[in-house]
Image (cartoon, rainbow, N blue to C red):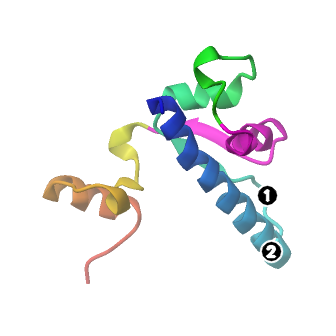
Amino acid sequence: MSTTEAEFVAPSQACKKAIWLYRLFMDIYHLQCVPVLQVDNENVIQLINYTEFHNRTKYIDVHYKFVRGKHHNGELNVQYCESVNQAADILTKPLSRYRFQKLKQLIGILEL
């Protein structure tokens, strides 16, 4: 499994959850914007933005290309997020104390 293929799985799963939450919130309150998916892998963003065939990605399952369809339909925006600003790292990786404190502030956790 290529690194790009592995990195494509997480945004696809996040896209499904973001679309579900967006629709839930639309039932409660009319939102004026679409969800934004922040991805820290530029190859994945290129796969989402450009639909031409890539030999290296021909084995990526069709359901993982769901995110591409949602992006092209305008239901989801995708933007690059540098790894140092990737807030999800606080939940997925061991971090230094400094990085943990920075990401904690980034997601809005305050010390009382």
Q: Which residues are magenta?
A: 61-81
Q: Which residue is mark 1?
A: 32
- Residue drawn at x 72%, y 17% is 53
Q: Is residue 112 magenta?
A: no
Residue 64 sits in quarter:
top right
Classify 63 as above or below 49. below
Graded by Cα atoms within 10 Å as few (under 14), some (14 to 19) or many (20 or more), the crowding at tag 2 reads few
Q: Is residue 102 left or right of residue 98?
A: right
On residue 29, the disc is 2
Q: Amino acid at mark 2?
A: Tyr
Q: Nearer the viewer, residue 38 or 3?
A: 3
- Seen as rendered, the residue at the extreme left is 97
- Residue drawn at x 50%, y 30% is 4
Residue 108 sits in quarter:
bottom left
Q: Nearer the viewer, residue 44 or 87?
A: 44
SS category of the residue bearing label 2: loop
Instruction: Name the quarter where the C terminus is drawn.
Output: bottom left
Residue 49, position as x, y percentages in the image: 69, 27
- Residue drawn at x 75%, y 23% is 51
- Seen as rendered, the residue at the extreme bottom is 112
Residue 14, position as x, y percentages in the image: 60, 55
Residue 13 sits in quarter:
bottom right
- Residue drawn at x 79%, y 58% is 32
Q: Nearer the viewer, residue 12 or 96?
A: 12
Q: Is residue 92 left or right of residue 80?
A: left
Residue 105, position as x, y percentages in the image: 33, 62
Q: Nearer the viewer, residue 4 or 91?
A: 4
Classify 83 as above or below 48. below
